[in-house]
Image (spheres, rainbow, N blue to C red):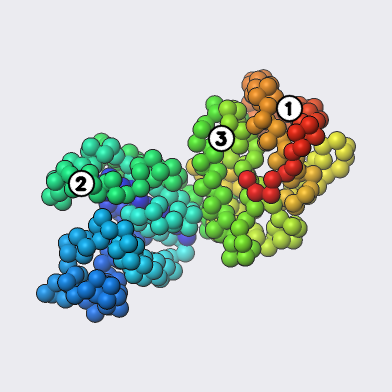
Amino acid sequence: MLKVGLTGGIGAGKSAVAQRLRQLGAVVIDADVLAREVVAAGTDGLAAVVEAFGPGVVGADGEVDRPALGARVFGDEAARRQLERIIHPRVRARTAALTAAAAPDAIVVNDVPLLVETGLVPTYHLVVVVDAEPALRVGRLMQSRGMTEEQARARIAAQVPDAERRAAGDVVIDNSGTLAGLETQVDQLWHERLTPYEKNVRLRTAAPSDGILRVAAPDPTWSTQAARLIARIDHALRPQLGGPADVSHIGSTAVPGLPAKDLIDLMLAVPTLEQADKLADALADAGLPRREGEWWDNARGLPGETWPKRLHGSADPGRPVNLHLRVTGSPGWRFALLMRDHLRADPQARDGYAAAKRQWAAAHPDVDGYAQAKEPWFDEEWRAAQEWAEATGWEPPTRS
């Protein structure tokens, strides 16, 4: 099963995206619908609302008088929080039940307006954000909901900033054009990403690579993407670990200004490889299945010495990831953190590495040849990194 979070600012057109996904075969769970159901007449949710806000928020039909309740909580932070404490747990429980009832090969889309605000981003395999310019959204709200311009702008301003919502999304769908254009974007997402992602999660296999080397220009969003992945890993492993997972962003995409393969390298520090093996199922469920085979780190400066590790990949065809599970304190663990911090701190070393990358890429169009060509450079730069560590007093961070 693939779990997708769908969100967007008010007036962005999230409902149109949800409708198209439903037509394509997704199981869509609408949080707004559930929020109405859990406070319907006769429910304990309605009783809790009445106790908190008084009988004046109930209409003659016994149902919630939504305009009256909205007027009571809008602009009152404490009242809004109180209402959320009544509704959100009930919606989460109902969502969990509906998700559990879906087929094992389902793509379950949770349509949640306040997904970012409620901290739910890490609970999904993928988050889709529907976006549109504020002026366009204001016009839609005035036309479809009868709001004044002032009311529409106030409702937009009451939500998280658009930039923050976009940063939370693995996919951002632009709904500034026509309905046909919107549906084309959704169809492409469904066929090229969601469908294969679901299959890979179900079969516990990483998305395949074509083996072609592509070195991309530095992408300032790599760190944000890594942070989302780290949050998902932490969410997936906390119940088993009993605390936060020690996950670091490493490799070239962790060094600002450095060109790299568009591949996010992450490292999960574990006390033992036996512990790593115990985490494999939870990581696979989260979309990061273990790669088959044995994987080793070469110990720099110690010819012939190697250290075992575990390697997981990404089931998501739209976001390649290598997740290295290394024992805390091992040479490979230290090497990954030291090289990252050394290249971050030394622009000359970073720029030298970037120039070397361009040469290797020109000479080796395949990933394996490129990787082998890098080894002599790392042997040399490793010594420089150790000297830098000694000069600066660098110590490996336990979490970063």
Name which quarter of the figure residue 108 lies in: bottom left
Estimate the x, y position of residue 14 in percent, counting from the top left: 29, 49
Residue pictured at 19% horizontal, 70% vertical:
57
Give the residue pinned by disc 3. 262
Earlier-in-chain disc, 2 versus 3 = 2
At horizontal 54% and vertical 39% (from top left) the residue drawn is 223
| Residue 312 seen by the camera | no
Residue at mark 1 to residue at mark 3: CA–CA distance: 18 Å
Q: Is residue 123 visible?
A: yes
Q: Is residue 265 left or right of residue 35?
A: right
For discs 1 and 3, the disc positioned in front in the rendered view: 3
* Among the two numbered marks 1 and 3 on one chain, the one whose residue lies closer to the N terminus: 3
Which residue was labeled with disc 1?
A: 373
Q: Amino acid at mark 2?
A: Ala
Contact between labelled residues 3 and 1, with CB atoms less than 8 Å apart: no
Specify the amino acid type for callout 3.
Asp
| Side of 254 where 60 appears, left or right | left
Q: Quadrant of residue 376?
A: top right
Q: Where's residue 233, x and y in %?
A: 57, 54
Quarter holding the C terminus is top right
Q: Secondary structure at mark 1?
A: helix
Q: Residue visible at 65% across and 60% down?
A: 279
Mark 1 burial class by Cα count in 10 Å: few <14, some 14-19, many 20+? some
Label 3: how many Cα within 10 Å (few below 14, some 14–19, many 20+): some
